[in-house]
Image (tube, rainbow, N blue to C red):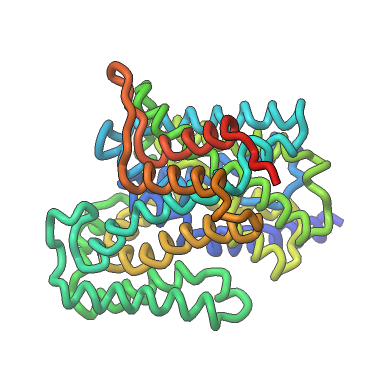
Amino acid sequence: MAATDYAFRLKDSLIGAQMLFVAFGALVLVPLLTGLDPNVAMFTAGAGTLLFQFVTKRSVPIFLASSFAFIAPIIYGVETWGIPATMSGLAAAGVFYVLLSALIKFRGAGILHRVLPPIVTGPVIMVIGLLLAKTAIFMAVGKSGDGSLELIPRDTALTVSMISLAVTILVSLLGRGFFKLIPILCGIVSGYIVSLFFGIVDFSAVADAPWLAVPSFVTPEFNIEAILFIVPVAIAPAIEHFGDVLAISSVTGKDYIKSPGVHRTMLGDGLATALASCLGGPPNTTYSEVTGAVALTKSFNPGVMTWAALTAIVLAFVGKLGAVLHTIPTPVMGGIMILLFGAISVVGMNALVKAGDDLMEPRNMAIVAVILVFGIGGMSFGVAKVTLTGIGLSGVIGVVLNLVLPQTKH
Protein backbone atom coordinates (compact mmCIF):
# COMPACT_ATOMS: atom_id res chain seq x y z
CA MET A 1 0.00 0.00 0.00
CA ALA A 2 2.85 2.36 0.87
CA ALA A 3 4.48 1.69 -2.51
CA THR A 4 1.18 2.42 -4.26
CA ASP A 5 0.80 5.71 -2.36
CA TYR A 6 4.35 6.64 -3.33
CA ALA A 7 3.62 5.92 -7.00
CA PHE A 8 0.47 8.07 -6.91
CA ARG A 9 2.36 10.93 -5.26
CA LEU A 10 5.14 10.70 -7.83
CA LYS A 11 2.56 10.78 -10.63
CA ASP A 12 0.79 13.77 -9.07
CA SER A 13 4.07 15.65 -8.65
CA LEU A 14 4.95 15.14 -12.32
CA ILE A 15 1.47 16.23 -13.45
CA GLY A 16 1.76 19.23 -11.11
CA ALA A 17 5.07 20.25 -12.70
CA GLN A 18 3.38 19.96 -16.10
CA MET A 19 0.56 22.25 -14.93
CA LEU A 20 3.15 24.86 -13.93
CA PHE A 21 4.78 24.52 -17.36
CA VAL A 22 1.40 25.29 -18.96
CA ALA A 23 1.09 28.47 -16.87
CA PHE A 24 4.77 29.42 -17.04
CA GLY A 25 4.75 31.65 -20.14
CA ALA A 26 1.85 33.78 -18.92
CA LEU A 27 3.09 33.72 -15.32
CA VAL A 28 6.48 35.29 -16.10
CA LEU A 29 5.17 37.55 -18.89
CA VAL A 30 3.43 39.91 -16.46
CA PRO A 31 6.46 40.67 -14.25
CA LEU A 32 8.74 40.98 -17.28
CA LEU A 33 6.39 43.55 -18.86
CA THR A 34 5.84 45.54 -15.68
CA GLY A 35 9.33 45.66 -14.23
CA LEU A 36 8.65 43.26 -11.35
CA ASP A 37 10.85 40.30 -10.42
CA PRO A 38 9.80 37.04 -12.17
CA ASN A 39 11.26 34.97 -9.32
CA VAL A 40 9.02 36.83 -6.85
CA ALA A 41 6.06 36.23 -9.19
CA MET A 42 6.78 32.48 -9.20
CA PHE A 43 7.02 32.42 -5.41
CA THR A 44 3.79 34.39 -4.92
CA ALA A 45 1.96 32.24 -7.51
CA GLY A 46 2.92 29.14 -5.55
CA ALA A 47 2.23 30.63 -2.13
CA GLY A 48 -1.03 32.19 -3.37
CA THR A 49 -2.23 28.86 -4.76
CA LEU A 50 -1.51 27.14 -1.44
CA LEU A 51 -3.39 29.89 0.43
CA PHE A 52 -6.31 29.54 -2.00
CA GLN A 53 -6.37 25.80 -1.36
CA PHE A 54 -6.44 26.39 2.40
CA VAL A 55 -9.39 28.80 2.14
CA THR A 56 -11.35 26.53 -0.23
CA LYS A 57 -10.59 23.40 1.83
CA ARG A 58 -8.39 22.01 -0.96
CA SER A 59 -11.44 21.17 -3.06
CA VAL A 60 -10.93 23.11 -6.33
CA PRO A 61 -8.24 22.13 -8.90
CA ILE A 62 -7.22 25.71 -9.71
CA PHE A 63 -3.80 27.36 -10.07
CA LEU A 64 -3.40 31.07 -9.32
CA ALA A 65 -0.77 33.26 -11.00
CA SER A 66 -0.05 36.70 -12.51
CA SER A 67 -3.16 38.59 -13.68
CA PHE A 68 -3.09 40.26 -17.12
CA ALA A 69 -5.83 42.71 -16.09
CA PHE A 70 -3.42 44.65 -13.88
CA ILE A 71 -0.58 45.06 -16.41
CA ALA A 72 -1.54 48.62 -17.45
CA PRO A 73 -2.06 49.98 -13.91
CA ILE A 74 1.15 48.32 -12.68
CA ILE A 75 3.18 49.87 -15.52
CA TYR A 76 1.66 53.30 -14.81
CA GLY A 77 2.01 52.87 -11.05
CA VAL A 78 5.67 51.82 -11.19
CA GLU A 79 6.52 54.76 -13.46
CA THR A 80 4.53 57.24 -11.34
CA TRP A 81 4.93 56.16 -7.73
CA GLY A 82 7.48 53.33 -7.74
CA ILE A 83 7.10 49.63 -6.96
CA PRO A 84 6.46 49.83 -3.15
CA ALA A 85 3.62 52.37 -3.56
CA THR A 86 2.12 50.39 -6.45
CA MET A 87 2.14 47.31 -4.23
CA SER A 88 -0.07 49.13 -1.70
CA GLY A 89 -2.65 49.67 -4.44
CA LEU A 90 -2.50 46.02 -5.47
CA ALA A 91 -2.82 44.89 -1.85
CA ALA A 92 -5.91 47.09 -1.53
CA ALA A 93 -7.32 45.37 -4.65
CA GLY A 94 -6.92 42.08 -2.76
CA VAL A 95 -8.85 43.58 0.16
CA PHE A 96 -11.55 44.63 -2.34
CA TYR A 97 -11.93 40.97 -3.36
CA VAL A 98 -12.24 40.02 0.31
CA LEU A 99 -15.03 42.58 0.79
CA LEU A 100 -16.76 41.29 -2.36
CA SER A 101 -16.59 37.75 -0.98
CA ALA A 102 -18.33 38.92 2.20
CA LEU A 103 -21.00 40.67 0.12
CA ILE A 104 -21.55 37.51 -1.93
CA LYS A 105 -21.81 35.39 1.22
CA PHE A 106 -24.57 37.55 2.70
CA ARG A 107 -26.38 38.70 -0.48
CA GLY A 108 -25.71 35.85 -2.92
CA ALA A 109 -23.70 35.71 -6.14
CA GLY A 110 -26.43 37.61 -8.01
CA ILE A 111 -25.31 40.86 -6.35
CA LEU A 112 -22.22 40.84 -8.61
CA HIS A 113 -24.33 40.98 -11.75
CA ARG A 114 -26.56 43.70 -10.35
CA VAL A 115 -23.71 46.01 -9.34
CA LEU A 116 -21.22 44.96 -12.05
CA PRO A 117 -23.20 43.96 -15.15
CA PRO A 118 -21.49 43.36 -18.54
CA ILE A 119 -22.45 46.88 -19.65
CA VAL A 120 -19.87 48.08 -17.08
CA THR A 121 -17.27 45.32 -16.99
CA GLY A 122 -17.13 44.80 -20.77
CA PRO A 123 -15.94 48.31 -21.70
CA VAL A 124 -13.64 48.46 -18.66
CA ILE A 125 -11.89 45.30 -19.88
CA MET A 126 -11.67 46.87 -23.36
CA VAL A 127 -9.97 49.95 -21.88
CA ILE A 128 -7.40 47.74 -20.15
CA GLY A 129 -6.35 46.20 -23.46
CA LEU A 130 -6.54 49.32 -25.64
CA LEU A 131 -4.52 51.48 -23.25
CA LEU A 132 -1.55 49.16 -23.79
CA ALA A 133 -1.68 49.17 -27.60
CA LYS A 134 1.07 51.80 -27.99
CA THR A 135 3.37 49.99 -25.58
CA ALA A 136 3.01 46.78 -27.57
CA ILE A 137 3.84 48.52 -30.86
CA PHE A 138 6.81 50.40 -29.41
CA MET A 139 8.32 47.18 -28.07
CA ALA A 140 7.56 45.27 -31.29
CA VAL A 141 9.65 47.77 -33.29
CA GLY A 142 12.56 47.62 -30.85
CA LYS A 143 11.87 50.67 -28.68
CA SER A 144 11.41 50.99 -24.94
CA GLY A 145 7.86 50.73 -23.64
CA ASP A 146 7.38 54.51 -23.71
CA GLY A 147 8.95 54.83 -27.16
CA SER A 148 11.72 57.15 -25.99
CA LEU A 149 14.68 54.85 -26.75
CA GLU A 150 15.57 52.59 -29.67
CA LEU A 151 16.99 49.43 -28.13
CA ILE A 152 17.21 47.27 -31.27
CA PRO A 153 17.29 48.24 -34.99
CA ARG A 154 13.74 48.47 -36.34
CA ASP A 155 14.10 45.89 -39.15
CA THR A 156 15.63 43.29 -36.83
CA ALA A 157 13.05 43.97 -34.15
CA LEU A 158 10.14 43.65 -36.60
CA THR A 159 11.42 40.29 -37.87
CA VAL A 160 11.69 38.93 -34.33
CA SER A 161 8.38 40.35 -33.08
CA MET A 162 6.36 39.24 -36.11
CA ILE A 163 7.74 35.68 -35.87
CA SER A 164 6.84 35.61 -32.16
CA LEU A 165 3.35 36.89 -32.98
CA ALA A 166 2.85 34.49 -35.90
CA VAL A 167 3.93 31.42 -33.92
CA THR A 168 1.68 32.36 -31.00
CA ILE A 169 -1.32 32.76 -33.31
CA LEU A 170 -0.61 29.56 -35.28
CA VAL A 171 -0.16 27.44 -32.15
CA SER A 172 -3.38 28.82 -30.65
CA LEU A 173 -5.23 27.98 -33.89
CA LEU A 174 -3.56 24.78 -35.08
CA GLY A 175 -1.95 23.37 -31.95
CA ARG A 176 -3.16 20.00 -30.78
CA GLY A 177 -3.31 18.56 -27.29
CA PHE A 178 -0.73 19.96 -24.91
CA PHE A 179 0.68 22.51 -27.39
CA LYS A 180 -2.69 24.25 -27.73
CA LEU A 181 -2.40 25.14 -24.04
CA ILE A 182 0.97 26.91 -24.34
CA PRO A 183 0.78 29.32 -27.31
CA ILE A 184 2.43 32.17 -25.37
CA LEU A 185 5.32 29.96 -24.29
CA CYS A 186 5.77 28.71 -27.87
CA GLY A 187 5.82 32.30 -29.14
CA ILE A 188 8.41 33.36 -26.57
CA VAL A 189 10.66 30.37 -27.30
CA SER A 190 10.50 30.83 -31.09
CA GLY A 191 11.21 34.57 -30.83
CA TYR A 192 14.07 33.88 -28.45
CA ILE A 193 15.65 31.38 -30.88
CA VAL A 194 15.43 33.89 -33.74
CA SER A 195 16.96 36.55 -31.46
CA LEU A 196 19.94 34.27 -30.86
CA PHE A 197 20.60 34.17 -34.61
CA PHE A 198 20.48 37.98 -34.76
CA GLY A 199 22.87 38.23 -31.79
CA ILE A 200 20.59 40.49 -29.72
CA VAL A 201 20.54 38.34 -26.57
CA ASP A 202 22.90 39.47 -23.78
CA PHE A 203 23.95 36.62 -21.47
CA SER A 204 26.32 38.63 -19.27
CA ALA A 205 23.84 38.87 -16.39
CA VAL A 206 23.26 35.10 -16.47
CA ALA A 207 26.93 34.35 -15.86
CA ASP A 208 26.99 36.70 -12.87
CA ALA A 209 23.75 35.41 -11.32
CA PRO A 210 23.99 32.83 -8.50
CA TRP A 211 22.39 29.42 -8.87
CA LEU A 212 20.48 29.83 -5.62
CA ALA A 213 19.18 33.19 -4.42
CA VAL A 214 16.33 34.55 -2.32
CA PRO A 215 13.84 36.40 -4.56
CA SER A 216 13.95 40.21 -4.34
CA PHE A 217 10.87 40.69 -2.19
CA VAL A 218 9.42 44.22 -1.89
CA THR A 219 7.12 45.41 0.90
CA PRO A 220 4.26 47.86 0.17
CA GLU A 221 4.45 51.55 0.95
CA PHE A 222 1.10 53.21 1.65
CA ASN A 223 0.04 55.60 -1.12
CA ILE A 224 -3.59 56.72 -1.31
CA GLU A 225 -3.30 57.82 -4.95
CA ALA A 226 -2.04 54.40 -6.01
CA ILE A 227 -4.82 52.73 -4.04
CA LEU A 228 -7.60 54.83 -5.59
CA PHE A 229 -6.11 54.33 -9.05
CA ILE A 230 -5.71 50.54 -8.87
CA VAL A 231 -8.62 49.27 -6.75
CA PRO A 232 -11.34 50.01 -9.37
CA VAL A 233 -9.37 47.90 -11.86
CA ALA A 234 -10.30 44.87 -9.73
CA ILE A 235 -13.92 45.27 -10.90
CA ALA A 236 -13.31 43.42 -14.18
CA PRO A 237 -11.23 40.49 -12.83
CA ALA A 238 -13.84 39.95 -10.11
CA ILE A 239 -16.46 39.13 -12.74
CA GLU A 240 -13.94 37.00 -14.67
CA HIS A 241 -13.28 35.02 -11.49
CA PHE A 242 -16.94 34.02 -11.38
CA GLY A 243 -16.67 32.78 -14.97
CA ASP A 244 -13.47 30.86 -14.23
CA VAL A 245 -15.14 29.03 -11.34
CA LEU A 246 -18.04 28.10 -13.63
CA ALA A 247 -15.52 26.85 -16.21
CA ILE A 248 -13.65 24.55 -13.83
CA SER A 249 -17.03 23.34 -12.49
CA SER A 250 -18.10 22.28 -15.99
CA VAL A 251 -14.75 20.53 -16.55
CA THR A 252 -14.86 18.47 -13.35
CA GLY A 253 -18.63 17.99 -13.15
CA LYS A 254 -18.76 19.50 -9.65
CA ASP A 255 -20.64 22.65 -8.62
CA TYR A 256 -18.01 24.82 -6.95
CA ILE A 257 -20.46 27.74 -6.88
CA LYS A 258 -22.29 25.84 -4.11
CA SER A 259 -19.36 24.00 -2.52
CA PRO A 260 -17.02 25.45 -1.37
CA GLY A 261 -18.99 28.46 -2.66
CA VAL A 262 -17.94 31.38 -4.86
CA HIS A 263 -17.59 33.51 -1.74
CA ARG A 264 -14.77 31.19 -0.61
CA THR A 265 -13.07 31.11 -4.01
CA MET A 266 -13.26 34.92 -4.20
CA LEU A 267 -11.87 35.15 -0.67
CA GLY A 268 -9.02 32.83 -1.60
CA ASP A 269 -8.26 34.89 -4.71
CA GLY A 270 -8.32 38.12 -2.68
CA LEU A 271 -6.05 36.83 0.08
CA ALA A 272 -3.66 35.40 -2.51
CA THR A 273 -3.54 38.78 -4.29
CA ALA A 274 -2.96 40.63 -1.02
CA LEU A 275 -0.18 38.18 -0.06
CA ALA A 276 1.51 38.56 -3.47
CA SER A 277 1.37 42.33 -3.24
CA CYS A 278 2.88 42.33 0.25
CA LEU A 279 5.91 40.52 -1.18
CA GLY A 280 6.31 42.52 -4.41
CA GLY A 281 4.52 40.17 -6.80
CA PRO A 282 1.69 40.83 -9.30
CA PRO A 283 -1.94 40.12 -8.32
CA ASN A 284 -3.09 36.53 -8.65
CA THR A 285 -5.93 35.19 -10.74
CA THR A 286 -7.24 31.78 -11.79
CA TYR A 287 -5.54 30.53 -14.97
CA SER A 288 -7.77 29.36 -17.82
CA GLU A 289 -4.74 27.64 -19.43
CA VAL A 290 -4.46 25.38 -16.40
CA THR A 291 -8.21 24.71 -16.48
CA GLY A 292 -7.70 23.60 -20.08
CA ALA A 293 -4.88 21.32 -18.98
CA VAL A 294 -7.14 19.83 -16.29
CA ALA A 295 -9.74 19.07 -18.97
CA LEU A 296 -7.10 17.55 -21.26
CA THR A 297 -5.40 15.34 -18.66
CA LYS A 298 -8.55 14.58 -16.58
CA SER A 299 -6.45 15.40 -13.50
CA PHE A 300 -9.27 16.54 -11.22
CA ASN A 301 -7.35 15.98 -7.97
CA PRO A 302 -6.68 19.37 -6.29
CA GLY A 303 -3.50 17.80 -4.88
CA VAL A 304 -1.96 18.17 -8.34
CA MET A 305 -2.15 21.96 -7.93
CA THR A 306 -0.39 21.61 -4.58
CA TRP A 307 2.55 20.07 -6.42
CA ALA A 308 2.41 22.79 -9.08
CA ALA A 309 2.52 25.42 -6.33
CA LEU A 310 5.44 23.75 -4.54
CA THR A 311 7.35 23.48 -7.85
CA ALA A 312 6.83 27.22 -8.46
CA ILE A 313 8.13 28.05 -4.98
CA VAL A 314 11.27 25.91 -5.49
CA LEU A 315 11.99 27.47 -8.91
CA ALA A 316 11.64 30.95 -7.39
CA PHE A 317 14.94 30.39 -5.57
CA VAL A 318 16.89 29.54 -8.75
CA GLY A 319 18.71 32.79 -9.40
CA LYS A 320 19.90 31.92 -12.89
CA LEU A 321 16.35 31.22 -14.03
CA GLY A 322 15.34 34.81 -13.32
CA ALA A 323 18.49 36.06 -15.05
CA VAL A 324 17.71 34.00 -18.18
CA LEU A 325 14.15 35.38 -18.26
CA HIS A 326 15.51 38.92 -18.19
CA THR A 327 17.55 38.20 -21.35
CA ILE A 328 14.37 37.88 -23.45
CA PRO A 329 14.67 40.73 -25.99
CA THR A 330 12.06 43.51 -26.10
CA PRO A 331 10.72 42.63 -29.59
CA VAL A 332 9.88 39.08 -28.47
CA MET A 333 7.69 40.50 -25.72
CA GLY A 334 6.28 43.12 -28.11
CA GLY A 335 5.10 40.50 -30.58
CA ILE A 336 3.31 38.56 -27.84
CA MET A 337 1.82 41.78 -26.44
CA ILE A 338 0.17 42.73 -29.74
CA LEU A 339 -1.97 39.59 -29.55
CA LEU A 340 -2.35 39.59 -25.77
CA PHE A 341 -3.57 43.16 -25.34
CA GLY A 342 -5.82 42.90 -28.37
CA ALA A 343 -7.24 39.70 -26.91
CA ILE A 344 -8.02 41.47 -23.62
CA SER A 345 -10.09 44.03 -25.54
CA VAL A 346 -11.84 41.24 -27.43
CA VAL A 347 -12.80 39.63 -24.11
CA GLY A 348 -14.47 42.89 -23.15
CA MET A 349 -16.32 43.09 -26.48
CA ASN A 350 -17.39 39.47 -26.12
CA ALA A 351 -18.86 40.20 -22.69
CA LEU A 352 -21.06 42.88 -24.27
CA VAL A 353 -22.05 40.64 -27.18
CA LYS A 354 -22.98 37.70 -24.93
CA ALA A 355 -25.03 39.98 -22.69
CA GLY A 356 -27.14 40.93 -25.70
CA ASP A 357 -27.68 44.53 -24.57
CA ASP A 358 -28.74 47.04 -27.22
CA LEU A 359 -25.77 49.43 -27.31
CA MET A 360 -27.79 52.00 -29.28
CA GLU A 361 -30.24 52.29 -26.40
CA PRO A 362 -29.46 55.74 -24.84
CA ARG A 363 -28.70 54.47 -21.31
CA ASN A 364 -26.34 51.73 -22.48
CA MET A 365 -24.70 54.01 -25.02
CA ALA A 366 -24.02 56.64 -22.34
CA ILE A 367 -22.40 54.15 -19.96
CA VAL A 368 -20.17 52.49 -22.59
CA ALA A 369 -19.24 55.77 -24.29
CA VAL A 370 -18.17 57.52 -21.08
CA ILE A 371 -16.19 54.50 -19.84
CA LEU A 372 -14.28 54.17 -23.13
CA VAL A 373 -13.48 57.86 -23.63
CA PHE A 374 -12.62 58.54 -19.99
CA GLY A 375 -10.36 55.47 -19.87
CA ILE A 376 -8.62 55.72 -23.24
CA GLY A 377 -8.57 59.53 -23.34
CA GLY A 378 -6.89 59.83 -19.95
CA MET A 379 -9.55 61.86 -18.14
CA SER A 380 -8.65 62.57 -14.52
CA PHE A 381 -10.40 64.04 -11.49
CA GLY A 382 -8.50 65.28 -8.45
CA VAL A 383 -9.35 66.47 -4.98
CA ALA A 384 -6.44 67.93 -2.99
CA LYS A 385 -3.49 65.61 -3.76
CA VAL A 386 -5.62 62.64 -4.72
CA THR A 387 -6.22 62.00 -8.43
CA LEU A 388 -8.38 59.34 -10.06
CA THR A 389 -7.53 58.63 -13.69
CA GLY A 390 -7.36 56.03 -16.48
CA ILE A 391 -8.77 52.56 -15.89
CA GLY A 392 -9.58 53.29 -12.26
CA LEU A 393 -11.68 56.31 -13.14
CA SER A 394 -13.46 54.50 -15.98
CA GLY A 395 -14.34 51.64 -13.61
CA VAL A 396 -15.72 53.94 -10.94
CA ILE A 397 -17.67 56.09 -13.38
CA GLY A 398 -19.14 52.97 -15.00
CA VAL A 399 -20.43 51.62 -11.68
CA VAL A 400 -21.84 55.03 -10.69
CA LEU A 401 -23.60 55.58 -14.04
CA ASN A 402 -25.11 52.08 -13.94
CA LEU A 403 -26.51 52.74 -10.46
CA VAL A 404 -27.83 56.27 -10.99
CA LEU A 405 -29.07 56.36 -14.60
CA PRO A 406 -32.75 55.38 -14.79
CA GLN A 407 -33.69 52.24 -16.66
CA THR A 408 -35.22 52.96 -20.07
CA LYS A 409 -38.98 52.38 -20.18
CA HIS A 410 -40.12 50.19 -23.03
In this view, the residue farthest toward the right is 1
Closer to the camera, 28 or 43?
28
In this view, the residue farthest toward the bottom is 174
Task: Report whether 408 appears left or right of 237.
Answer: right
In this view, the residue farthest toward the front is 410
Residue 173 percent location from the top left of the image:
54, 79
* Whether residue 314 can be seen here: no
Task: Report whether 221 appears left or right of 402.
Answer: left
Q: Residue at x 45, y 44 (%)?
A: 371
User: Where's the N terminus, which quadrant?
Assistant: bottom right
Q: Residue at x 53, y 63 (%)?
A: 21
Q: Residue at x 67, y 51 (%)?
A: 243
Q: Say above or below: 319 vs 174.
A: above
Q: Residue at x 45, y 30 (%)?
A: 278
* Whether residue 384 can be seen here: yes
In this view, the residue farthest toward the top is 384
Residue 118 percent location from the top left of the image:
60, 48
Closer to the camera, 182 or 396?
396
Residue 160 percent location from the top left of the image:
27, 75
Task: Report whether 122 appears left or right of 227.
Answer: right
Closer to the camera, 145 or 192?
145
Residue 236 percent location from the top left of the image:
54, 44
